[in-house]
Image: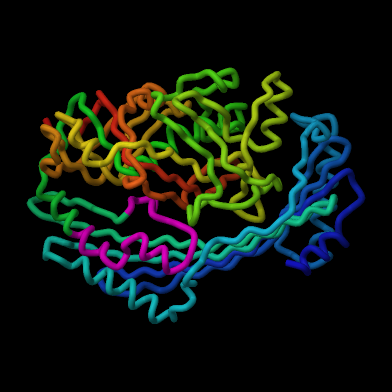
Amino acid sequence: MDTLEHLARKAAPRCDAWSLRGVTESSEQLTVRNDVPEPPQRQRDAGAMVSVIEHGALGYAATSDLTEGGLRAAFEAALQLARAAVGKSVVDYREVELPHASGRWQSPNDRPVSQLTLADRFALIGRVCASAKVDDAIVDRTASLWTTHTEQLMVTSSGERIEQVWDLVVPSVTAVASAGGDTQSRSSAGQYNGFCQQGGLEVLDRAGFADDGARVAREALELVHAPNCPTGEMDLLLMPDQMMLQIHESIGHPLELDRILGDERNFAGTSFVTLDMFGSFQYGSALLNVTYDPGVHAQFASFGFDDEGSRAERQWIIRQGILQRPLGGALSQARARRLGHDIAGVATARACGWNRPPIDRMSNLNVEPGDATLEEMIASIDYGVQMRTNSSWSIDDSRNKFQFGCEYARMIRGGKLAEVVKRPNYRGISSRFWRSLSMVGDRGTFEVMGTPYCGKGEPNQVIRVGHAAPACKFSGVAVFGGAQ
């Protein structure tokens, strides 16, 4: 990193302002399927993005050639693009308040995964896979472990230096049961690897990875013999691993400021949220409190600074149901001001790698816990359903109307958990759904989740996101399943 900074300062051109963001990332994915280890998948990637501001216009370029000559060529390309954009930019970058922060941030990592040899890592995963063979009706079993180490350096022409280091762990278990002409899959945390955190082997302890094989397999067997979820309007109790998807799709994406400004319209859609809603719009019931919190211990998208160089701090996004601020970085905030809306955003402009520019992204977007125990929430429901773990999702281009499916559900009758049901689904309209929030679980129901797979942007960027939430009860929800 010191060498990269030295070379950048030698290679940078004379201009109004410049920055360099260098990234080195290595990852390993290990999988055991039906007790057979698959070949390890390992990747290493390194490169740098440089940006140049000249006469109010921005140009940027990326390179994997981290020599002085490679950086100099990238800076020259960025400078030429900036000069070509003078007078044609959406925003005059002289009006953008550039961040002036320096510092270092690093993931917590109490027990590095590297403490285990490759053979030991495969042995651990193999034991989990083997433990899922609880019955002959289990026809497929998979256990996997995905680890990533990322180092990033950002330096600027005005002397800022930001260094960040991430260690990321994603465990996963899946079991498939087949019986009576039906096949059902159950996973430890969903198809998008919902349990993912920063750290080392301690993440596996928090995930219950060693015991998940048997649990997941037993629940797959329950599902294959279960009746279909009934259809009708009823109370819905969402557990944190489904709340993750609900937050992501119906709060996170609609509140990305660049999407509100129209950037995603031709690709991933627009938003039902408009600039004049902030500060007054009733997004949910008074029980809904949502924070952007990049400092949550071990959460998947925790960091100290975003990729524009802004220092990251906890902020209220929705407070007592009222929409407070969007997920928009310094550039998007400047664009909103040009349209007459002086809206405070958050430090959440992020890039998925060295060859992509930062855009407005979700980071750690969390529903804050309330004061209801899980037992109290169940007892309050005369007729309803508890759902866990996303299996399918669909939402319209404005991130408004949606329908989501879950892997596993149990009916609630007379305030008590009842039979397991399969193929549970529900539908709603984003703000109307959040206004039906009638109970929020306490800290005892709160879980830190996330996903490695949030896609957005052209060219596409797939980025890591954190979502933490308690269990939440919603009243009068349209539920549907396979029942006739």
State the extent of the magenta-drawn residues as a range. Answer: 189-217
**Above or below for 60 versus 135:** above
Residue 180 position, x and y percent, is 7, 51
Q: Is residue 480 left or right of residue 419?
A: right
Q: In percent of the image, x 70 and y 37: which residue is there?
A: 330
**Above or below for 205 versus 185:** below
**Residue 241 visible in the snapshot:** no
Residue 11 position, x and y percent, is 86, 60
Q: Is residue 289 left or right of residue 26?
A: left
How many numbered marks does the figure carry? 0
Residue 355 position, x and y percent, is 66, 53
Q: In percent of the image, x 18 and y 25: which residue is there?
A: 232
Q: Is residue 396 left or right of residue 377?
A: right
Q: Is residue 474 left or right of residue 222?
A: right
**Residue 229 visible in the snapshot:** yes
Q: In percent of the image, x 53 and y 40: which residue is there?
A: 292
Q: Quadrant of the C terminus?
A: top left
User: Can you tell which quarter of the image residue 71 is in?
Assistant: bottom right
Residue 118 position, x and y percent, is 43, 79
- Answer whether residue 321 is magenta in the image: no
Q: In percent of the image, x 31 and y 27: which residue is there?
A: 438
Q: Residue furthest left?
A: 180
User: Can you tell which quarter of the image residue 144 is in?
Assistant: bottom left
Q: Residue furthest front?
A: 371
Q: Quadrant of the N terminus?
A: bottom right
User: Can you tell which quarter of the image residue 6 is in?
Assistant: bottom right
